[in-house]
Image (spheres, grey):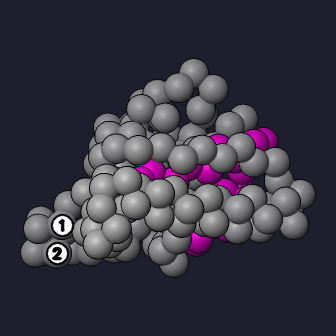
Amino acid sequence: MVVLVPIDDSDPAWTALELAVEAFPGTLLVVHVVDPLRALATHGSRGLDGAMDAAQHDAERILAAATAHADSRGVATETEVAFGDPARTILEYAALDEVDHVVIGSHGRTGVGRILLGSVAETVLRRSPVPVTVAR
């Protein structure tokens, strides 16, 4: 069984990783999606190339920490850095033949916050071709 765990260094994402480690046997495919627009907003003073390099570095740090955590619990991981719209990219990974399940964190936004900001977890939950578990 391969379980996809998108991770963005938020508390809900780490909760999702922990849930996946505890509840699902098999291999975890841990993916960090770099949103180019967010990378520019966060690291824009470095220019486009500098922003993407900084985002790549952040992604590698997050994935290394996720791997270390899973390894300490005896769970195998594969990691990948992807670039694009987070919800769309996660759904592309969920559609891979080897992925059997998605465990994703949610910030639990409701009302106007969800309407204005959207919800990656909600989009994945509604459109995923495989079962999804949402951790808060």
Q: Position of residue 103 (x, y in %)?
A: 54, 53
Count of marks, rendered view: 2
Start-end of magenta stretch = 14-34
111 vs 106, left or right, is: left
Q: Residue at x 79, y 65 (%)?
A: 68
94 vs 120, left or right, is: right
Residue 84 versus residue 75 in the image, above or below: above
Q: Position of residue 39 (x, y in %)?
A: 34, 62
How packed is label 1: few (under 14 Cα within 10 Å), some, or many (20 or more)? Answer: few
Q: Which residue is drawn at 42% across and 32% down?
A: 92
Picture quadrant where residue 26 is located: top right
Q: Is mark 2 on a helix, strand or loop?
A: helix
- Residue 117, label in figure: 1
Q: Where is residue 44 in the image (x, y as percent from the top left)?
A: 28, 68
- Circles 2 and 1, Cβ within 8 Å, touching? The answer is yes
Magenta stretch holds residue 136:
no
Residue 110 versus residue 118 in the image, above or below: below
Q: Residue at x 75, y 48 (%)?
A: 77
Q: Is residue 104 visible?
A: no
Q: Which residue is drawn at 68% across and 37% down?
A: 2
The residue tagged 2 is 113
